Amino acid sequence: MPDLFFQTFWVGLSVWIVLFVSDYTLTTICAKLYRAGVCNKIVFEGSYEITPYFQRDIDSLRVVSPSFLLALLLNSTLLFIVWWLVPPSVSHLYIFLLGALILTQLSVHIRHIRNLFLFRAAATDAVRGRIEYSRPVLLRASSIEMISFSGMLLVLFAFTQSWFVLGGCVACLSLAAKHWRLARRHISAAAIGAAKPASASIS
């Protein structure tokens, strides 16, 4: 089975496509639950979607997203190019990329399942009160979560020496760094926005 998964392009691609479609579907489902009343108890500053690239489509609850289809096409093409051009002697590069795509999706799915459970509970009296997350806290929490997944995969790589696992480790770490940068950018933008009224009042 592992040989079929790594040596047959369509098997690995199909697994990733299923996970990618599931990712977008679960994001939309959770966004609907959030807007249907969960937002009265759990408040996220800004868009429910963390990734800026998908925010417009998720905010509008689009079932068919042009941005999603483009990302699906580009990543599938990249995976095919690597699989087609890389010689067998360095096939670990394809396995690394496949691991980056699939294991990142599996990590994100854990978050979706947690949110789905939490949001359904929040729609009832099982969750009481109100909590509000600022955008930087939300992004940093996501970053820490992805770092945790990366660390877990790094430990697993130490035992397996699998390029597939290493790909997931590096991809999760890269996503964690991206979210941390977005948090810093948001804080800087907020600081600049707060400084402008102050400088205007002084003048």
Image: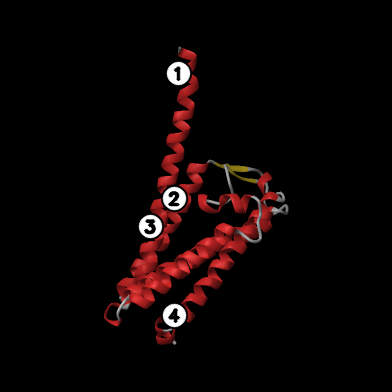
Q: Secondary structure at mark 2?
A: helix
Of labels 1 and 4, earlier in sequence is 4
- Tag 3: amino acid: Ser
Distance from Cα at disc 1 to Cα at disc 4: 59 Å
Q: Secondary structure at mark 1?
A: helix
Distance from Cα at disc 3 to Cα at disc 2: 9 Å
Q: Which mark is residue 174?
A: 3
Q: Where is mark 1, residue-wise?
A: 199
What x and y, as percent, mark residue 198? 47, 19
Asked whether the viewer can see residue 162, the reply is no
Q: Residues within 10 Å of mark 2 (few under 14, many from 20)?
A: many
Quadrant where the C terminus is found in the figure: top left
Distance from Cα at disc 4 to Cα at disc 3: 25 Å
Q: Which mark is residue 179?
A: 2
Residue furthest to the left in view is: 89
Q: Is residue 35 left or right of residue 99?
A: right
Q: Residues within 10 Å of mark 1 (few under 14, many from 20)?
A: few
Q: Which mark is residue 9?
A: 4
Distance from Cα at disc 1 to Cα at disc 3: 37 Å
What x and y, as percent, mark residue 184? 41, 41
What x and y, as percent, mark residue 182? 44, 45
Of labels 2 and 1, earlier in sequence is 2
Residue furthest to the top in view is: 203
- Tag 1: amino acid: Ser
Viewer-nearest of discs 1 and 4: 4
Q: Residue at x 61, y 53 (%)?
A: 58
Distance from Cα at disc 2 to Cα at disc 1: 30 Å
Task: Choose between 92 and 40: the one closer to the eye.
Answer: 92
What x and y, as percent, mark residue 77? 45, 69
Q: Is residue 71 left or right of residue 94?
A: right
Distance from Cα at disc 2 to Cα at disc 4: 31 Å
Q: Residues within 10 Å of mark 4 (few under 14, many from 20)?
A: some
